[in-house]
Amino acid sequence: MAELEVRVVSERREGLLVELGRLVTEYGHVLIRQRLVQEAHGACLTLVLRGPDERQLALEEALGTHPRVLSFESLRPQLMEAPPPHAVVAPPVVRAAPAPHVAAASIPRPAAPPDSAPIAAGADVGRVERMLPSLAKDYPRIFPWLINLDYAVAAEARDASLYLAGRRTGAWVYKRDFALGAKLGLVDAIRRIALPAMRVLVTVEHQENQLHVRGCPLCQPGGTSGGRFFCGFIEGLLAESVDARSVFARETSCHSHGASMCVFDISH
């Protein structure tokens, strides 16, 4: 597995990360970190990816020829370190991309997750609601959508919007996969419902009333925590499965703040 850094410029930023994220996943790569800024000549998106060496050229070609991409630049960090003496380091490859085009027809989307979850105060409800059908359609490959939501909403609405998206998605997954079971105690519900549902999305371990997540895509070191999504997701999963009036999930440790893993403590 090798790292690849790419930089693309597009006319507009809306939905750019989601569309290119699908290509990244399709070619067997994962997103390590990203940066999206608006510049004078367009939206500039930088992606650091990791994936198999043999598929990197194909991924570069797919990204460089994507209709949303006006210009494309690629470099491989491991090849840029310590060049041998007298070596000439070639500049990054820059490819011209074809002009963007408008799709002729939209793709029908499945129904959104149910609206039984409470509204999180301060959330950008309209934007979350518009995103939910896409989460259902692409599930479990939902992280490009959530990262895009992170960029799209105002800073003060970020945590509440991620929480609401998680709560609605968790309730939808529960109704889809687990709703026919009987009411459970909290520890059993975590083990039999929350743990397997979380494992579809991330690497997770169960310890009593806690879930430990390693390598969370929403909590990169030095960045802002995306743990509110998983707090909402866990609560949405367990709200109707536990023989208690309410369930609460809170993040007590986060990878983005320097911890080795994200820890979610669950109580009722």
Image: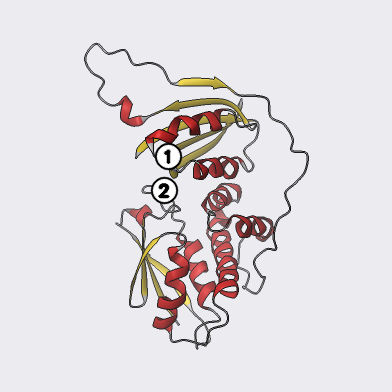
- Above or below, comparing residue 221 to residue 214 in the picture: above
- Above or below, comparing residue 8 to residue 247 in the picture: above
The residue shown at (69%, 58%) is 126
- Above or below, comparing residue 88 to residue 67 in the picture: above
Q: Quadrant of residue 190?
A: bottom left
Q: State the separation of the CA atoms marked 1 and 2.
A: 16 Å
- State the image coordinates of residue 155 (x, y, percent, origin top left): 55, 51
Mark number, residue 49:
1
**Residue 225 relative to residue 157: left or right:** left
The residue shown at (67%, 58%) is 133
Residue at which label 2 appears = 223
Mark with earlier residue (1, 2):
1
Closer to the camera in the image, 17 or 159: 17
Mark number, residue 221:
none
Q: Please count the marks in the image.
A: 2
Dot 2 amino acid type:
Gly
Q: Secondary structure at mark 1?
A: strand
